[in-house]
Every structure is written in C-alpha cells, then in structure tokens.
C-alpha cells in the first residue's frame, strides 16, 4: 500500500460503531470497522507527535498501557457499560493525520 498514492479517507460513526475508509490510487477502498466506539480523536498532520506516527503509519496499532484509556475507564460513571472491554487504537494516515479510537474491537471489512 505504501508504494501507491494515498487519495484520502473518511471516518463515519453510526449507532455506536465507526468505519474508517482509506482510498489508495488504483486499489479498491480499504475499510476498518471499530465496534462500540466510546471516544474518537483526530489530530491534523502538522499537530501529530512522533509517538502518534511511530508504529501506526498506514496500519492499525493498539496502544498498550494507554494512560488516556485508563483515565476514561476510571472516570466512566455509567451504571451499565456499553462495552465489555476497551482498547486504544491509533492509525496515522500521511497527508491527513492521526485517528485515535477507544473501542471494544476493530476489524478489516
């Protein structure tokens, strides 16, 4: 994928789930589904830190020992949780920026 030209992406949320669609020239769109999304953040390219890029360049990386995720779970006051477990996922897309998601799971469609 890295040898082809990146054309853009879309991040759509619906009914608690999200789909990240990545478009690469001369290839069908690639989609990643995030299930039971509790939090999403997008950081524009020029504001991304080296930590956000490393290990997540055009790939889904799970952030282990995530302090923001631990804080989110600790501060979630809902009596009935909408998730069984949460993971912190990160995807950096060159020319666009970094998507970060707290969700129960993710998978390629």
Image (cartoon, grey):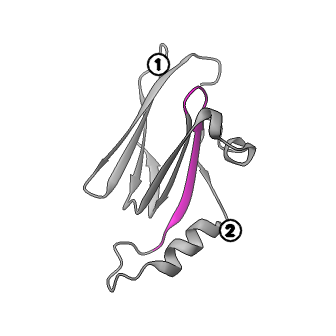
Q: In which quadrant of the rendered view does residue 97 lie?
A: top right
- CA gap, disc 2 to disc 1? 35 Å
Of the pair 109 and 42, the residue shown nearer to us: 42
Circle number at residue 65: 2
Residue 81: name its quadrant: bottom left
Q: Is residue 86 left or right of residue 16?
A: right
Sequence-first disc among 2 and 1: 1
- Outermost residue toward the left in this view: 15
Using residue 43 as the reference point, say whether residue 46 is left or right of it. right
Q: Position of residue 87 (x, y in %)?
A: 53, 64
Left or right, 54 with respect to 3, comes to right
Magenta stretch holds residue 86: yes
Q: Residue at x 52, y 81 (%)?
A: 74
Residue 60 x/y as whole percent:
57, 46
Rendering coords of residue 107 (x, y %): 45, 49
Describe residue 97's horizontal placement relative to residue 34 as left or right.
right
Q: Is residue 2 above or below residue 57?
A: above
Dot 1 falls on a residue whose secondary structure is: loop
What crowding class fits label 2: few (fewer than 14 Cα within 10 Å), some (14-19), or many (20 or more)? few
Quadrant where the N terminus is found in the figure: top right
**Residue lying farthest to the bottom in this orientation:** 79
Number of numbered markers:
2
Q: Where does the magenta region start and end? A: 85-96
**Residue on which the image places disc 1:** 27
Q: Is residue 17 above or below residue 45?
A: below
Going by the picture, which residue comes out furthest to the top?
26
Check the picture and name the quadrant holding the C terminus: top left
Circle 1 packing at 10 Å, graded few (<14), some (14-19), many (20+), is few
Residue 106: percent from left, percent from top: 46, 53
Q: Quadrant of residue 3?
A: top right
Question: What secondary structure is marked by label 2?
Answer: loop
Residue at 33% across / 86% down in the picture?
79
């Amino acid at each position: 994928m890295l040898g082809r030209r990146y054309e853009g992406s879309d991040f759509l949320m619906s009914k608690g789930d999200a789909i990240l669609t990545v478009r690469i020239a001369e290839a069908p769109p690639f989609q990643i589904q995030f299930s039971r999304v509790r939090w999403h953040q997008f950081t524009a390219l020029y504001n991304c830190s080296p930590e956000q890029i490393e290990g997540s360049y055009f790939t889904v990386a799970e952030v282990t020992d995530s302090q923001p995720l631990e804080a989110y779970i600790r501060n979630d006051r809902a009596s009935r949780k909408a998730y069984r477990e949460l993971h912190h996922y990160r995807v950096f897309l060159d020319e666009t920026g970094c998507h970060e998601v707290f969700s129960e799971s993710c998978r390629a469609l």
